[in-house]
């Protein structure tokens, strides 16, 4: 099974857990068998591999999410990186060119495309396998998955099939309706359009070449910022006559808001939370190392993270985005390919950060023009490289890097460091990367 997961999202609707570099699919909120927590992307990836251990998974995403993907899924997952946001048709066209030119997938092979963040069970991925098989064998150019609706939703587009068989030709597509019109669609046998479809790779490559002037993957990547923003539905699906839909009647939820996300939580709280007996339908997600106390609340979500604190009626939480758009602040937490960081304190001329590096990983070798840095190792073992000189470090060691001096830190075990940045112009853009000296090895 060749599957492309579309990983978008602006990080707004699940604030304060999400931000511009940590979209909803990376929030670890679902309980695992070992009493830990996993994110949506980890859950979906695990489910795919449990259904088909040989599945080739490629994630189509923006540059800002690549580090989080490698942090959570490892280095072996395929990633088709969008240089900038251009909606789903350019993203799928780029992913198709990546599969063909970089991964070597043949044009006659079936490819399945779906969002990275549905809340589903394994029967969904078994259905995806059947969808891919149908796309490979059918004369149809596109085979869509239609979700059996459970209520008249105004949030989704609708697919109206010709008949009620499991696989049917498509009669017509309908835009997101009012609830009243949605009831009429459902009475006609309409299905939710969950953004899931399958095709033979060559078909989408041909459609991409019809609509975009490019030679291959590298050329398309290079001119990506010039492409028109357009969805795959508008660019391809609505113009295709030879199209089928396959019904799916299993559990399917769109985890797009706090209200729907809390419905999938197995317990009422994650992190330090206390609720008195008068609380009803209250969920708390607390990433701070301080307790949250709730008393006498009903139908409320409380979320606390380094980015901020949300206290909201669950229904009202769906309207969070315009308020979050007005918040302009430093990103306080982010996952990187080497670990993570959390901003602890910001002053006019300094910033203090807690850095956690995973074993065997390290930062890029780099320097800063406008700030000094001081590292204090709080636990673990590793090595620093400062101006080409390698030194072993462990808990209690302090390392100073003046502005202009290249440096990095490499973790031999899980390593935690308090980093203090000092300068009058502290910026994420003040970073010059360079090659690590040949005498230094990464474990």
Image (cartoon, rainbow, N blue to C red):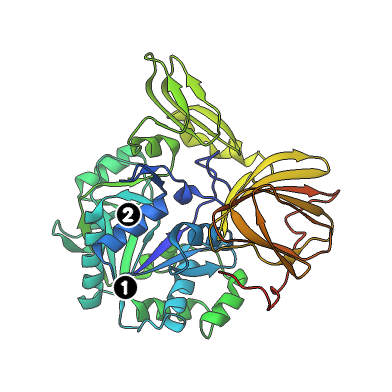
**Occupied quadrant, residue 124:** bottom left
- Picture residue at 50% right of the left edge, 52% below the top: 9
Q: Please name the residue that numbered disc 1 is placed on.
A: 199
Query: How dense is the environment of label 2, judged by Cα within 10 Å: few (below 14), some, or many (20 and up)?
Result: many
Q: Nearer the viewer, residue 245 or 385?
A: 385
In this picture, is 356 found above or below 82? Answer: above
x then y, percent, for residue 115: 39, 57
Q: Nearer the viewer, residue 425 or 405?
A: 405
- Picture residue at 24% right of the left edge, 62% below the top: 51
**Occupied quadrant, residue 168:** bottom left
Nearest to N terminus: mark 1 or mark 2: 2
x then y, percent, for residue 6: 43, 61
Q: Secondary structure at mark 1?
A: strand
In this picture, is 172 found above or below 253? Answer: below
Q: For this view, does 14 lie left or right of residue 4?
A: right
Q: Secondary structure at mark 2?
A: strand
Q: Marks 1/2: CA distance?
A: 16 Å
Q: For this view, does 21 lie left or right of residue 285?
A: right
In this picture, is 188 found above or below 433? Answer: above
- Picture residue at 13% right of the left edge, 59% below the top: 165
**Occupied quadrant, residue 3:** bottom left
Q: Check the picture and name the quadrant holding the N terminus.
A: bottom left
Q: For this view, does 26 lie left or right of residue 35?
A: right
Q: Nearer the viewer, residue 24 or 318?
A: 24
Q: Nearer the viewer, mark 1 or mark 2?
A: 1
Q: Nearer the viewer, residue 291 or 380?
A: 380
Query: How dense is the environment of label 1, judged by Cα within 10 Å: few (below 14), some, or many (20 and up)?
Result: many
The outermost residue toward the left is 165
x then y, percent, for residue 286: 50, 33
Q: Please name the residue that numbered disc 2 is placed on.
A: 193
Q: Is residue 171 visible?
A: no
x then y, percent, for residue 68: 52, 57
């Amino acid at each position: 099974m060749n599957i492309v997961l579309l990983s978008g999202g602006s990080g707004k609707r699940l604030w304060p857990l999400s931000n511009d570099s940590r979209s909803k699919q990376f929030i670890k909120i679902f309980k695992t068998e070992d009493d830990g927590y996993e994110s949506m992307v980890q859950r979906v990836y695990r489910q795919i591999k449990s259904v088909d251990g040989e599945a080739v998974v490629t994630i189509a995403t923006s540059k800002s999410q690549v580090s989080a993907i490698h942090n959570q899924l490892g280095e072996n997952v395929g990633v088709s990186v969008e240089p900038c946001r251009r909606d789903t048709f350019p993203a799928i066209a780029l992913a198709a060119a990546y599969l063909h030119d970089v991964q070597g997938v043949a044009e006659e092979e079936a490819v399945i495309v779906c969002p990275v963040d549905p809340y589903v069970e394994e029967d969904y991925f078994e259905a995806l396998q059947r969808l891919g098989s149908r796309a490979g064998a059918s004369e149809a150019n596109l085979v869509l998955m239609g979700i059996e609706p459970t209520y008249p939703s105004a949030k989704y587009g609708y697919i109206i099939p010709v008949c009620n068989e499991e696989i049917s030709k498509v009669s017509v597509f309908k835009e997101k309706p009012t609830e009243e019109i949605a009831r009429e669609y459902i009475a006609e046998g309409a299905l939710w359009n969950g953004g899931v479809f399958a095709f033979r790779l060559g078909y989408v490559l041909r459609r991409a070449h019809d609509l975009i002037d490019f030679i291959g993957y590298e050329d398309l990547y290079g001119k990506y910022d010039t492409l028109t923003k357009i969805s795959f539905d508008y660019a391809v699906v609505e113009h295709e006559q030879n199209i089928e839909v396959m019904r799916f009647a299993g559990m399917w939820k769109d985890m797009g808001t706090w209200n729907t996300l809390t419905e999938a939580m197995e317990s009422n709280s994650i992190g330090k939370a206390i609720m008195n007996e008068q609380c009803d339908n209250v969920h708390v997600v607390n990433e701070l190392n301080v307790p949250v106390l709730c008393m006498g609340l009903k139908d409320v979500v409380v979320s606390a993270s380094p980015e901020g604190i949300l206290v909201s009626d669950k229904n009202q939480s769906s309207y969070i985005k315009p308020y979050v758009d007005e918040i302009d602040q430093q990103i306080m937490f982010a996952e990187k390919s080497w670990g993570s960081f959390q901003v602890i304190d910001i002053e006019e001329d300094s910033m203090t950060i807690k850095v956690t590096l995973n074993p065997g990983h390290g930062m890029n070798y780099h320097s800063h023009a406008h700030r000094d840095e001081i590292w204090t190792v709080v636990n673990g073992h590793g090595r620093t490289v400062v101006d080409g000189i390698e030194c072993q470090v462990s808990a209690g060691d302090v390392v100073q890097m003046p502005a202009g001096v290249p440096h990095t830190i490499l973790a031999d075990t899980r390593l935690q460091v308090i980093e203090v940045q000092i300068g009058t112009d502290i910026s994420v853009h003040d970073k010059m990367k360079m090659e690590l000296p040949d005498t230094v090895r990464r474990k």
